Image (tube, rainbow, N blue to C red):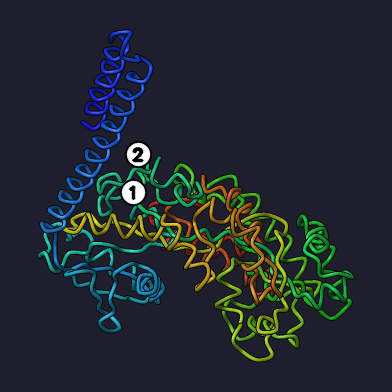
Amino acid sequence: MKKKVLSMLLASTMTAAMLAGCGSSNEEPAAATTAAADAATDAVTEAAATTEAAAAETTAAVEDTAAADEGKVLNIECWNTEFQSRITDHYPGYEKVDDTTGKIGDVTVNWIITPSDDNAYQNNLDTVLPENLDASADDKVDIFLMEADYALKYVNSDVTLPLTDIGINPDTDLADQFQYTKDIVTDSNGSLKGASWQACSAGLIYNRAAAKEVLGSDDPETVQEAVKDWDTFNATAAKLKDAGYTITSSVNDTYRVYSNNVTTPWVKDGKVVVDDNIKKWVDDSKELVDAGETNTYDLWSDDWNKGFYPDGKVFCYFGPAWLINFSMAPDQEGSIANEGGWGFCVGPQSFYWGGTWIAAAAGTDNPSLVKDIILTMTTDQDVLKEIVEKDYDCVNSKSLLTSLATDDSFGLPVLGGQNPYGLLEEGAEKVDMSNISDYDQGCNEEFQNALKGYFDGNYASYDDAIAAFNKAIVEKYPDVTTD
């Protein structure tokens, strides 16, 4: 409509100019033509502004009508308070009522938090989401959150809405987001069913004091050269041992790096496949453990955490920005992070760890609000920059990370002022999730459990450990076969 009006007005402008040019030679035709053209141009500008304003008013009216027809309760299912804090701190117009309730305009927001322990969060989703279409208006789930390890379980089902169903165009609205963050939540038909504000690309987080002592420098380029591939990494481990350090706290520190770089999915044609890169993790880890150059601690255990402090004598951990900022004791006096004593480089292979995806639940009666929350929290540049500044998240915006990478004010205190965003952006571009599968969470967990027994000497051989793994997987996934 707007284009049609402008075309008509432009045609009028040309006609007026032509008529003015055909006037009497005694009427100064050039001046008359210019005046007519100026007047017509002013008319076009004024009409265009009026039309644009009318279109904006119409759009606002349509959106207001849609919002008026929607539910007055927004239910959000999640496993912790991370997304709640992001909404509370950064979503325009959100008002906190109490720890589990908020308001957006006249809509009540309910935060339904079910911890992930013992699979409780997924068990809850498996109960409520299939019944959502028939639930009463105030009980309908509108948004639920997912992690990558099990996202396809919900993405490849009818409990999630394609983002196009709520008015989000992935090709235009989400064009600035990293491809891997979209691949993780794309169903088998090619429909995108979620979005994330995070790009959790990760790297090698190294102890600067140890680097100076053993490698002669804590410069990221120098350290990267010493860990540039797995063979070089393992050779550096021997040097670190001579100086009293283990290269990592645990073999589990490197597992995600290897598992993110596989060439086959865990299950292919109904059969469990152990990828060659996973087998390399086994071989490399066994060698490091037997040489006393790392340990077999469980992640998040007290023994694993010891390396967060100088006396722990650990050279490096592997992880994204959130690991350093939230998990490595940055607020504890005497910790390496508290003293700005960590550095960051890519390491042997690029990988990612973590991330939270926002999904629209099928049956939601608040599609307009859900759309606005997803777009605001994952694409609004001002909101994303606030999240970086306050929460130190690595956000899912190529252009913003490019901008931050050259801004010295975004150096992280835990990294001694080093700005990691250029490396994080580069890493995010390299993440390949083409081999993700519905079985990833269970297979990764059971494989590490079984191989710990091999590293600790509880199994006589690798084959014995694999037999234990196969048994656990068949019990967990009766639809697969193993060797």
Foreground residue among 425 and 4: 4
> Tag 1, which secondary structure?
loop
* Residue at the spot of label 2: 189
Q: Amino acid at mark 2?
A: Asn
Disc 2 crowd rating (10 Å Cα; few below 14, some 14-19, many 20+) is: few
Q: Residue at x 61, y 48 (%)?
A: 430
Instruction: Please indicate whether residue 456 sits to the left or right of residue 31 in the image.
Output: right
> Tag 2, which secondary structure?
loop
> CA gap, disc 1 to disc 2?
9 Å
Rendering coords of residue 248 (x, y %)? 72, 72
Of marks 1 and 2, which one's residue comes earlier in the chain?
1
* Residue at the spot of label 1: 156
Foreground residue among 325 and 172: 172
Instruction: Please indicate whether residue 199 sits to the left or right of residue 318 in the image.
Output: left
Q: Amino acid at mark 1?
A: Asn
Relative to 216, does residue 174 appear above or below in the rendering? above
Rendering coords of residue 355 (x, y %)? 47, 62
Q: Residue at x 50, y 72 (%)?
A: 391
- Mark 1 vs 2: CB contact within 8 A: no
Q: Residue at x 62, y 72 (%)?
A: 453
Foreground residue among 121 and 219: 219
Rendering coords of residue 253 (x, y %)? 64, 69
Relative to 58, does residue 458 appear above or below in the rendering? below
Which residue is at the far front? Answer: 26
Disc 1 crowd rating (10 Å Cα; few below 14, some 14-19, many 20+) is: some
What is the quadrant of the N terminus in the image? top left
Instruction: Please indicate whether residue 470 sits to the left or right of residue 227 in the image.
Output: left
| Numbered badge on residue 28 | none
Say which quarter of the image contains residue 401: bottom right
